[in-house]
Image (spheres, rainbow, N blue to C red):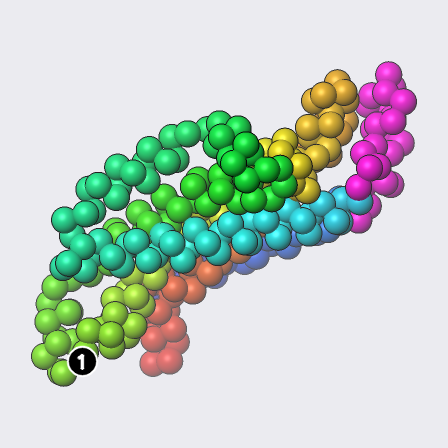
Amino acid sequence: MSLVSQPRGGLYRRHRHRWLAISSLLLIGLTFGMPLATPLFHAIFPELERPLYLQESFFGLVLAHLRIVAISGGIAVLAGIGTGLLVTRPAGKAFRSLLETVLAISQSFPPVAVLAVAVPLVGFGETPALIALVMYGILPVAQGAMTGLSSIPQPILEVARGIGMSRRQILWRVELPLAAPVILAGVRTSVVINIGTAAVASTVGAKTLGLPIIVGLSGFNTAYVIQGALLVGLLAIVADQLFELLAQRWSPQSNDRLQHRSHA
């Protein structure tokens, strides 16, 4: 069984690396080489006088998009893991159902509605966008943290207590490492969702890859919409594949393979 499963695992990893390389090259190529596609867009949309978005460089838009996703994602990860830790401790277990309800309600609001409420309070720009993205991104992280920390077998925790480990040592050396794959899955979902949702932030003045999409929709320029959507989609694909590779390194199967190789 192991002789058969190892080649399959190697083929799967090579397949994932190949697709990551292809999608990354496409993202880089379109980011820097979109102007070279001007004749193609002229041919596809001959009725458009300006089929290429020129108001901002696509490289600058990609960096701005990644920046707002990184800030909102960092806040969502810290808040999500923090709330997961809070409600999985004995003192906070009574608040778990309430927290899950509040988080579910917060994600049920459409991002546009959150932006419409936040703009009168904090003004235009990145701030209302960050509020909407954090509200949208915190639920998957919190759910992953709660699920991962709650699913740790009690005998493992009893053994840790029996050998004299403190609560902090159990948390950092036992609970978080064992829950890491589930937490990572929640972070992965949160980041990928926010990459797509961040495009909406341009409706309130934030600089993202949503700018060509919004300008294209308002000016009936389908070429602009396609250019922005292609880069947003490729960003989400690359991020998802990077998290997939990271999850493989943290999975129990990968640890078993490493142990098998060390014994072999």
Horizontally, residue 195 falls left or right of residue 4, namely right
Start and end of the magenta stretch? 32-56
Q: Residue 117: x and y, percent?
A: 49, 30
Quadrant of the image containing the C terminus: bottom left
The residue depicted at 21 percent of the width and 41 percent of the height is 98
Where does the N terminus fall, quadrant-wise? bottom left
Q: Is residue 217 above or below residue 10?
A: above
In the picture, residue 257 is in which quadrant? bottom left
- Residue 55 is left or right of residue 6, and the answer is right
Amino acid carrying label 1: it is: Met
Seen in the picture, residue 88 relative to 109 is either above or below; the reply is: below
**Quick one: SS at disc 1?**
loop
Residue at the (15%, 69%) spot, across then down: 156
Between 235 and 130, the one lying in front of the other is 130
- Residue at image x 26%, y 37%? 101
Dot 1 alpha-carbon crowd within 10 angstroms: few under 14, some 14 to 19, many 20 or more = some
Residue 189 spot, x, y in % from top left: 43, 45
Magenta stretch: residue 155 in it?
A: no
Q: Position of residue 30 (x, y in %)?
A: 75, 44
Rendering coords of residue 54 (x, y %): 84, 37
- Asked if residue 45 lies in the magenta stretch, the reply is yes
Closer to the camera in the image, 159 or 102: 102
Q: Residue furthest bottom?
A: 164
Residue tagged 1? 165
Q: Residue at x 87, y 34 (%)?
A: 38
In the image, 31 versus 123, the foreground residue is 123
Q: Nearer the viewer, residue 189 or 42?
A: 189
Residue 171 in sight in this render: yes
Say left or right for 261 vs 155: right
User: Quarter-wise, where is residue 202 in the image?
Assistant: top right
Regarding residue 1, the answer to whether it shows in the image is no
